[in-house]
Image (cartoon, rainbow, N blue to C red):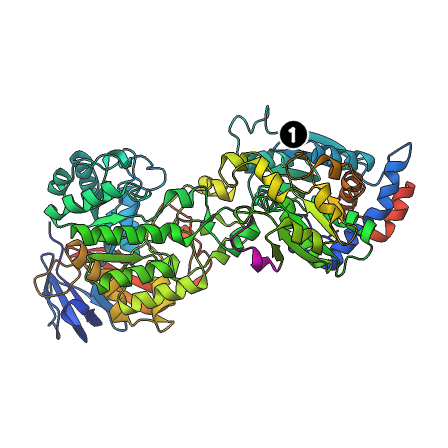
Amino acid sequence: MSARPIILQGGRVLDPSRDFDETADILIVDGKIESSSGKVGSRDDAEIIDCAGLIVSPGFIDVHCHLREPGREDVETIATGARAAAAGGFTAVCAMPNTDPVTDNQAAVGFIIRQAQRANASRVHVIGAISVGQKGETLAEMGEMVAAGAVAFSDDGRPVVSAQLMRTALEYARSFSIPVIDHCEEPTLSHGGSMNEGIVSARLGLKGIPSEAEEIMVIRDILLARRTGGHVHLAHMSTAGSVELIRWGKERGINVTAEVCPHHISLTEDRVEGYDTNAKMNPPLRTAKDVESLRNAVKDGTIDLIATDHAPHHYDEKEREFADAPNGIIGLETALAVSVTNLVETGHIDFRTLVDKMSCAPARLFGLPGGSLGRGTVADVTVFDPSREWDVDPSEFRTKGRNTPYVGMRLKGRAVCTIVGGNLVHRL
Amino acid sequence: MTSALGKDLLGLEFLSSEQIRLILDTAEPFKEISERSIKKVPALRGSTIVNLFFENSTRTRISFEFAEKRLSADTVNVSASGSSVQKGETLVDTARNLEAMRIDMVVIRHSASGAAQFLAERIESNVINAGDGTHEHPTQGLLDLLTLRDHLGDLTGKRVCICGDVLHSRVARSNIWGLKHVGAEVAVCGPRSLLPNAIEEFGVTVFERIEEAIEWADALNVLRLQLERMTAGYIPSSREYNRVFGVSRERLERAPRDILILHPGPMNRGVEIDSDVADGPHSVILHQVTNGVAIRMAVLYLLAGGRPELAEAAKGGRP
């Protein structure tokens, strides 16, 4: 069933995929972009949305989130996650496979796709596990999962410890032209750690995770990508050293791409002070120097895209001793505002680059629909207010999670409308 | 009434030097109570105190219990084994249940860094940190300061070296902050694998060799080397540790001045400290234990809202 045509009227249409940045109307008919430059005459059958003062961009795509279903439906479901995505301006998200059971076979992939269709909100793409059960031992049936709809592979939450397995995964995934995503963490170095290693961890008496735990795996993966020609995508980069290594790899034409999470470009290890478990994530919050380096890496293109690592947890699980609390924070409904506040407002990037990092690059690198407002493209559109200020109140979120370090913070930038396949799935 | 220390005693890092001096000065009159034949004053009569020990402890728990009893408080001891904790109850639920029974103070020992603060933020009662993970052990730091002051006088400019496993030691952190607050010079000495990577940022001197530390220091605070550090691979063996970092009489004899030897206990004789040092003339280890009771009485008294200038009077019998 197709919705009424929609006219997005008079907004600043910002579409880096076509190098287009002008005030224009967008006409959406039958789930596709019918017109996206110039003015559109009024139509009696269309819903007209006034976009004056707003930015109209290709829909945001989050390549990294945890929707917890199957297994932890008390914490998040595919439906609540997809609605949270819509509220945050994401027209599509990619669900990580560390569910229970693990998404490591075609049936599990099919389940997520069906649940997402039922949810009727933002699109949910599936990331399959690299290894059976995410155990890091034997390769999962990648070919069958791709046939069922998987768009990438990852053992996220766990590093691929075996270099041989990582090599094989990169080689094997080449047949399907899809990326292998690694959670870079050398486990013997990070073992028992719950925050960045440094003066704050030393003072608080918490075991630290040195930046080298990430960087050792970053360079390993880059070297394996060079050897195999496979596409390695590095999840949630958190250190200045990782940025240097990725830059080194890209300069040599190695097929490496990388993402950064909003929290790693906005918060530092100081946020752990007072043992706030909402500042606990893996990789951990690092130093001001790392934050600055990551912001500059977004600017110069070393970091390809912004991803949330949305990780809802039950409040009971976060309400405990720091070392025992689970890693992760929710991010779908704050990602845009945190990025506007900490990248655009600070002068590191302009809105065009922001839209590229949140929409065009994810679509391009992961081969996903969307990422463009070109005529005939699927009508996945985000309309956001670049200057709207709001105070973060987790009780208003669509996600079931409430675990955010941004509670009470004033941020700038908010999604006003989210359109998926021509359907309005969110309107502020 | 807000006490001079605030609601809780969680660590020494964020106390002021005045607050630390206040505790040490308040402990002075309380020392004498333990020397009496009737070791009891009514200062905390009617107060209910729970000693919540999630980790095994002999010395600290008994010391707190004596301090509480000598101030006439009603005390209850809860240990993790055999309690609801073993049945899977969370720390916050344990605390809320205790508080529902209308208590006044909680003394908590826990294996997780931050556990005392966690508790303090969630209950109305005063919370005293009796050791949280590898974070702080403030009453130990205070009793060490009191012992050093008893022997060295004013600690401004005095040189104290903390020796051993600083990385995993809550005693070390409380000592570093406490000593710096009272103006002492602080150093650490131990294998680099047992020092925090960022140790210099604490503003302390680092000695690689114990001989250098002994040449420099007025006092050594020798930390216990926990045997699980060997199995975790931080150092090769306790034998080698003793050879390279152990405090021996032979090494002390080469010191240019008399050095005080402190140890928070329990000692591994023949590992971090040799018996003839522990039992020798430089050792003030048992004096630390005696001072522990007075320090804890002072902390309990002050947190309960007791006025420091009345400590002498409280000692005389008036509440």
Is B294 drawn above or below residue A388 in the view shown? Answer: above
Q: Is residue A116 left or right of residue B292?
A: left
Is A24 drawn above or below residue A276 in the view shown? Answer: below
Q: Identify the residue at horizontal 39%, vertical 53% (top origin).
A: A212
Residue placed most toward the observer, A144 or A111? A144
Residue B122 picture location, percent across and down = 59, 44
Residue range of the region highlighted in magenta in the rendering: B195-203
Residue A94 picture location, percent across and down = 24, 49
Query: What amino acid type is highlighted by mark number 1?
Result: Val
**In which quadrant of the rendered image does the C terminus of chain A lie?**
bottom left
- Whether residue A346 is visible: yes
Q: Quadrant of residue B277?
A: top right
Q: Identify the residue at horizontal 27%, vertical 62% (top origin).
A: A248
Q: Residue furthest top?
A: B82
Q: Is residue B244 left or right of residue A1?
A: right
Q: Identify the residue at horizontal 21%, vertical 70% (top origin).
A: A14
Q: Identify the residue at horizontal 59%, vertical 52% (top origin).
A: B208
* Residue named by callout 1: B78
Taking the magenta stretch, the answer to whether it contains residue A380 is no
Residue placed most toward the observer, B147 or A297? B147
Residue B68 picture location, percent across and down = 77, 36
Subunit under mark 1: B
- Whether residue B141 is visible: no
